[in-house]
Structures are given as structure tokens and as C-alpha cells.
Amino acid sequence: MFDSEMAARVSGQGFFAALDQSGGSTPGALRLYGIPDDAYHGEAEMFALIHEMRMRVMTAPAFTGSKVVGAILFERTMDATAAGKPIPSYLWQDRGVVPFLKVDKGLAVEANGVRLMKPISDLEPLLVRAAALGVFGTKMRSVITLPDRDGIASVVRQQFDIALQIASHGLMPIVEPEILIGSPDKRRAEAILLEELTTALDAIPAGTPVMLKLTLPDVPDLFAPLTVHPRVARVLALSGGYSRAEACRRLAANHGVIASFSRALIEDLTASMSDAEFDAALTKAIDEIYTASVEKA
């Protein structure tokens, strides 16, 4: 059973902050933050630096539930503390932000134009631990490069099989089949994905809602039917490498869709900023993403 207060909050106005960079995406996030590759040695130092950045974001004055309804966390972030509390508790109790957890372990090699998720061998104990820490839901990511129907169908099938397992623990699954913005036929891939998602949603049991996190489509409102599907709690959009300005422009043209941005949220933040400069830049980013999430063209 979902926490009713958290469920009400994630259905309200605002957007999600994706603070779940993993091993593959962390070096790029640190470069964007002004920390070059030669500033750290090894995975432990790398994750320590990205954790410092995440903590700076989560504890900033502007990072509250008034505009940020949810935050997606990396596992190591979930296990850390802030103000003497586990971070999921801190986010919800002190900031009014609903905590989610990234559960996938990265991507398999490409086949049929897609990259499925690697096996998640520790999923069951991870879900138990997340629920005990007060996490509301989870997120898992696959990647689609080409408009190959068999490949896209395999992505959706894997995502929904695991989503049902997650839902059995009383957690809200976010299904993220990302279409790369550099796909050579992005529109066709998006059309196939819409068909496959609709089929999968129609097949899951009533009373088993999921969230979807999708690449901003080339055709505005392409995914509008999913926003009103009875099995869909929310449709989120990832920025996917678009600049914040471009991501917000596209987001504002897609009704019923809110942001779940990572790169576009932190693109103007740097480690060298003073606290005042950092807070001003984050406030500006939050305001722009919030506006595109709630005010549609």
C-alpha cells in the first residue's frame, strides 16, 4: 500500500529531480560541475565528490516540495544521512520531497537496437531495505537507439516484468525506456514505443499503477494518451542531453507531462560557486523547470 500523503504529493504540481547518476554517468556530471577527471582517483573518490554535489542540491533553500515533488536517489545516497536522518526521511520530513530509488545496475550490450538492463541480482533485499527507509518508489532505465520493434518490445517486457515485482513490495515503479536523442530515426522509435507501452499497460492488473519516464518526443503530445491511461500514475520527461532551455521548451509543449531532469537541472552549478551563487543558480533552474512542468503551451 502506498503512503497516502506521498501519493498525493507526487500527483500534485511540480517536477522530479533526478539525482541518481551512477558509475557511467558520474564523470560527465562532475565535469559539468567543474570537477575534471584528474581531480579524483578511483571510484570511491568519484562517488564522494558527486555525493557532495547532491547534498549541496538537496539542502539548498530552493530545494523543497513547493516545486520539487520527488527526488530519484542513487543507492549510496539513500544509505547516507542528512541532519542526522536517513536521506529519504530527511527529504520527506524536512523538505517535503518524495524519495525514489534507482534500482537498475546499468545496461547490457546493445542488441536489436536497444540496451536492456543488466540482471538486478539483489533486487529483493534492495526493495525491502528501500521500503524500510521510507522510499516511495523506484526507477530503472533501459536505452533504445533504433526503431526495431523486437528490440523495443523486449525493453518494455523486461521493464514491466520487474515493475510488477517492485509493485508487490508496495513501491511505485518508474519505467524508463529512454530513446536516445541522437537516434537516427527517433520519431519512428517513439511511435513504436507508444504502441508497445500501451499494450503492456493494458495487460497489467488493475490497481497496479506505474509511472513512465520518457524522452521528450519530436511530435508534441505524442505521449498524451499515456497521461490519461488508467494504469499510469504520472508521465515524467527526461532531459536526455538537451540543454535546459531546449528541454523546457519541449516539455512545455507536452500536456500532462512533468520533468524528471538531471543534467538540465544542474547544468549551471559549479563546485567553485559560493553558497549564495549556488543557491541563486539552483533557484533559477528550479523555477524554469517548474514553469515548463505546470504551464503548457
Image: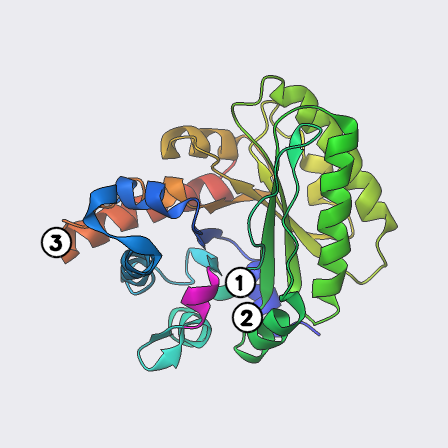
State left or right for residue 7 relative to residue 54: right
In the image, residue 202 sits, relative to residue 98, either above or below, namely above
Label 2, secondary structure: give it. loop
Label 1, secondary structure: give it. strand
| Residue drawn at (60%, 52%) of the image | 140
C-alpha span from label 1 to label 3: 29 Å
C-alpha span from label 3 to label 2: 31 Å
Q: Which mark is residue 274?
A: 3
In the image, residue 30 sits, relative to residue 87, either above or below, namely above
**Which numbered disc flags the more N-terminal residue, 3 or 2?**
2
| Residue drawn at (41%, 72%) of the image | 87
Residue type at tag 3 = Ser
- Count of marks placed on residues: 3
Please name the residue that numbered disc 2 is placed on: 135
Q: Nearer the viewer, residue 231 or 13?
A: 231
Q: Which mark is residue 31?
A: none
User: Is residue 75 found inside the magenta-colored segment of the image?
Assistant: yes
Residue segment shown in magenta: 74-79
Please name the residue that numbered disc 1 is placed on: 100
Identify the image's colour scheme: rainbow, by chain, secondary structure or one colour: rainbow
State left or right for residue 28 relative to residue 160: left
Instruction: Specify the farthest residue to the bottom.
Output: 84
The location of residue 241, given as percent across then percent down, is: 43, 33
Instruction: Specify the farthest residue to the front.
Output: 42
Q: Is residue 8 visible?
A: yes
Dominant secondary structure of the magenta stretch? Answer: helix
State left or right for residue 293 relative to residue 40: right
In the image, residue 21 sits, relative to residue 84, either above or below, namely above
| Residue drawn at (44%, 34%) of the image | 248
Q: Quadrant of residue 116?
A: top right
Q: Quadrant of the N terminus?
A: bottom right
Label 3, secondary structure: give it. loop
